[in-house]
Amino acid sequence: MRNLLQKIFSFSKRTNSRPGKKKNKSKGQSLVELTLTLPLILMLFSGMVEFGFMLNYYLSLLDATRYAAREYSGGDPWIRDANNNYNGDNISGYTLNGQSYPGFYSPAASTVYAELAPKDINDTTRKITLNPATDDVIISVYSIDQNGNITDYPTAGPYHLYGNQHSPAVTDATIQSGLVSGGPCEGILSVEVDYTYHQVLNLPWMAWLGSPVLPAYTIMPNQAVEPQC
């Protein structure tokens, strides 16, 4: 009886061990599938890495506009006359009654540039250098009365560091959409930087992305241009 059972079990083991060819076939099939899908997976992964670089650049641009907006939210974008009334746009500073007053628009734009590419040799963070031919920094100020009417400054239009005339991301419509009906008079400062992003990996299958312009901006109150309501 014992011998009979041993023969039965040994036979079942031999029959179960036969599908060796199927196992080898399964390995070969997996290898083919991996060969077909690996290039696609690598392309998707490299695309995620490239978009990660682009997002990192955008956050650096945003930080620079925030710093400049905080720095100049208490500044005066107007040239004042002897009676403290508006007498022009304070682009780079002026002198009144022998006293010098600091500039507003030009220094604010230069602050954005300096934050992106600090000259400190001890600063090891990534530096973003703006290209005067393609990039720009745009500074605008808005004076809003109690009826929601908006007056833009500088009077000649938004200040451009390089004059590339990029269309500002912040417009009167942008400001108007954020106003509360019946709200108080307000003064608003807008600091924007437009940077042409050049791909870091520069891979051929990402050529469709090109060199997109990344607009980053910050809006902050500016009490100096609040109208008297």
Image (cartoon, rainbow, N blue to C red):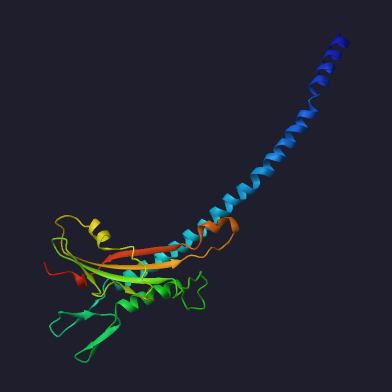
* Residue found at x 33% / y 78%: 106
Residue that extends furthest to the top in the rendered view of this protein: 1
The quarter in which the N terminus is drawn is top right
Q: Is residue 138 above or below residue 180?
A: below
Image location of residue 124, percent across then percent down: 52, 72
- Residue 203 at x, y percent in the picture: 59, 59
Residue 161, image quadrant: bottom left
Residue 160 location in percent, x, y? 34, 74
Q: Residue at x 49, y 60 (%)?
A: 54
Residue 104 left/right relative to 1: left
- Report the residue that reaches farthest toward the bottom: 98
Q: Nearer the viewer, residue 166 or 37?
A: 166
The residue under the point 30% across, 64% down is 219
Classify 10 as above or below 210. above
Q: Quadrant of the C terminus?
A: bottom left
Total tally of numbered discs in the picture: 0
Vertical side of 161 occupied by 19: above or below: above
On screen, residue 42 versus residue 157, left or right, reads right
* Residue 59: quadrant of the picture: bottom left
Foreground: 22 or 151? 151
Residue sitting farthest toward the left: 229
Q: Is residue 191 left or right of residue 86?
A: right
Horizontal and vertical percent for residue 165?
36, 71
Residue 57 horizontal side relative to residue 224, left or right: right
